Image (spheres, rainbow, N blue to C red):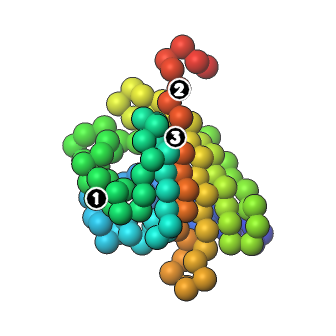
């Protein structure tokens, strides 16, 4: 496995952890995966900051073990620069599809890979 693949695999692992209900409901676990400079443009069009996301995540879709869970597919990634990985994939949750794009960066403070940016675009039902 190449170094580049290792970086992509670490970002994918972080992405999948962020979809897990036990991480979404734990501010401390989510904090380990979100960069302090994190920004998201959600499927709703809303812009989220690090603090806003940490506060809202436990109440968002996919945060309950009993409720609908994220079903990711077609995850692909590439290294844009040393310590910077771009991921793309699709999710379905509760019948809603979205195409997603994330930037993960490796923190120089030794805390590992963190999601720096995320964007979700809803996919209408009629789109293949």
Across and down, in percent, residue 100 comes to 56, 42
Per the image, the residue denoted by label 3 is: 120
**In which quadrant of the rendered view does residue 33 lie?**
bottom left
Q: Nearer the viewer, residue 34 or 77?
A: 34
> What residue appears at the point 49 percent right and 45 percent down from the top-left corner?
41
Look at 59% across and 63% down and name the residue there. Answer: 104
Q: In which quadrant of the rendered image does the C terminus lie?
A: top right
Q: Secondary structure at mark 1?
A: helix
Residue 105: x and y in percent read 61, 68
SS category of the residue bearing label 2:
strand
Q: Quadrant of residue 52?
A: bottom left
Q: Write down the residue under mark 1.
A: 55
Residue 86 horizontal/vertical position (percent): 66, 55
Check disc 1: other Cα within 10 Å, few if <14, some if 14-19, many if 20+. some
The answer to whether residue 98 shows anywhere in this view is yes
Residue 123 numbered mark, or none:
2
Determine the CA span between mark 3 and mark 2: 9 Å
Q: Is residue 27 left or right of residue 113?
A: left
Q: Is residue 81 above or below residue 126?
A: below
| Quadrant housing the N terminus | bottom right
């Amino acid at each position: 496995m190449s170094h580049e693949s290792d970086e992509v695999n670490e970002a994918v692992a972080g992405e999948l952890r962020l979809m897990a209900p036990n991480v979404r409901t734990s501010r401390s676990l989510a904090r380990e995966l979100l960069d302090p400079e994190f920004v998201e443009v959600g499927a709703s069009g809303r812009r989220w900051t690090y603090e806003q996301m940490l506060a809202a995540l436990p109440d968002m879709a996919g945060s309950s073990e009993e409720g609908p869970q994220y079903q990711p597919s077609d995850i692909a990634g590439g290294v844009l620069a040393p310590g910077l990985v771009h991921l793309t994939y699709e999710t379905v949750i509760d019948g809603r599809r979205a195409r997603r794009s994330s930037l993960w960066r490796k923190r120089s403070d030794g805390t590992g890979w963190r999601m720096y940016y995320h964007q979700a675009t809803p996919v209408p039902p009629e789109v293949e």
